Amino acid sequence: MKNLLLWEKWRPKTIEDLILLPRIRKHFQDGYLNQNYVFYGNAGTGKTTLARILIGKYTKDKAYLEINSSLYTSIDILRNDIESFCKTIPMLETEDPMKYVFLDEFERISPAYQEALKAFIEHYSSRVRFILCTNHIEKASAELLSRFSVINFDCQTPDEEKWVKTEFYKKISNDLKNDDKTVPKEILGKIINNKFPDLRSCIVQVDNYLLIGDIENSETNENSLKLKEQLYNVLYNEDMKYENVYNFLMDSFGSDKIYIMIKMLSKDLIKWILENKNEDAEKLFEINYVIADYSLKLDTTDPIVLGMTIIGKIRKILN
């Protein structure tokens, strides 16, 4: 098993461990959902992590369904997967009678999907709670939002920003100490100021610093040693879930730079792995067939979806 990336390893598993503004935390003091919620705001502000904690993903004590809407955009998901899940009634009396549906990145769903979702929310209101997360609240219809309690995860005042930055610093410092790692105070402060409000990107940058001892050149490029190390870990870590692969692609490349990942995979990364890692050369060269098949689709396919597909195909070859 390969080492986990820090942002994956340090992800909070309880509400107590999660950095939440007090005005947000007060909604969830008891850890339960008494209504439907939309969480919105910048990337890396804790929306997805809080949703997963609330639906019981880490404690496994609730019935839940999680769907990444950037990967599954078809309305058929609603008509099949979600409806099937909502219809099922827990068989054991000791089970939580409420069920939970979490749609992440839900701004990717179509207006027709949003319209149909309204009916589901109303029909199953007695036994299903819904959480939607998005970075783009403006893409949700007013009619859909009217059925939710809407919470903004972005800082609204200078005092809130100061509080969150302080909590960022304390959390990362504590996680570093627990892992017996060290980052100078001034470097950590600079990383937080540069990447705020995205805590996940802060941790990615800390990981980069620990790897190469430099934060000045953070531009994504195919010659980056940090990216080669991280991409290697993504390809060979069989235990890394696809939701974490998705986060890696968004943090390291984004939609506008997936072409750099494809370029790295086609030549530079293979050469680097052969020179620095003890891996099967024959399997590595099979990567070229995947790149040849999918690289031409970049102009006609969502870049992140294409990137996920390429990574998935390569992982099946290598592991």
Image (cartoon, grey):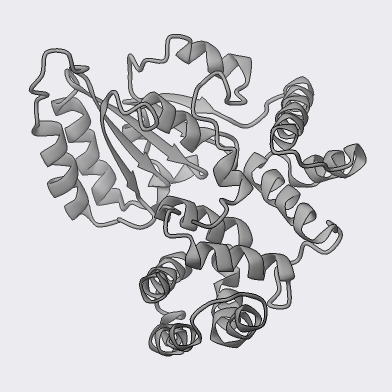
Q: Is residue 101 above or below residue 222?
A: above
Q: Is residue 234 above or below residue 189?
A: below
Residue farthest right in this picture: 186
Q: Which corner quadrant of the image does residue 215 belong to?
A: bottom right
**The C terminus lies in quadrant:** bottom left
> Foreground residue, 109 or 241?
241
> Is residue 76 or residue 7 the one in the foreground?
7
Figure label count: 0
Q: Position of residue 193 (x, y in %)?
A: 81, 41
- Residue 306 position, x and y percent, is 42, 71
Left or right: residue 181 versus residue 4 is right
Q: Is residue 101 visible?
A: yes
Is the residue 195 above or below the residue 96 in the image?
below
- Image coordinates of residue 122 in percent, x first then y, are 19, 26
Q: Image point 59% across, 15% down: which residue? A: 23
Q: What residue is rendered at 41% in x and 55% in y?
A: 242
Position of residue 50 measured from the top left corner of the image (x, y, whole percent): 48, 29
State left or right for residue 149 relative to residue 250: left
Rendered residue at 58%/23% (across/down)? 17
Between 20 and 108, the one nearer to me in the picture: 20
- Residue farthest front in this picture: 278
Question: Taking 167 as reference, is 80 above or below it?
Answer: below
Asked if residue 253 can be seen in this view, the reply is: no
Q: Is residue 90 left or right of residue 297?
A: left
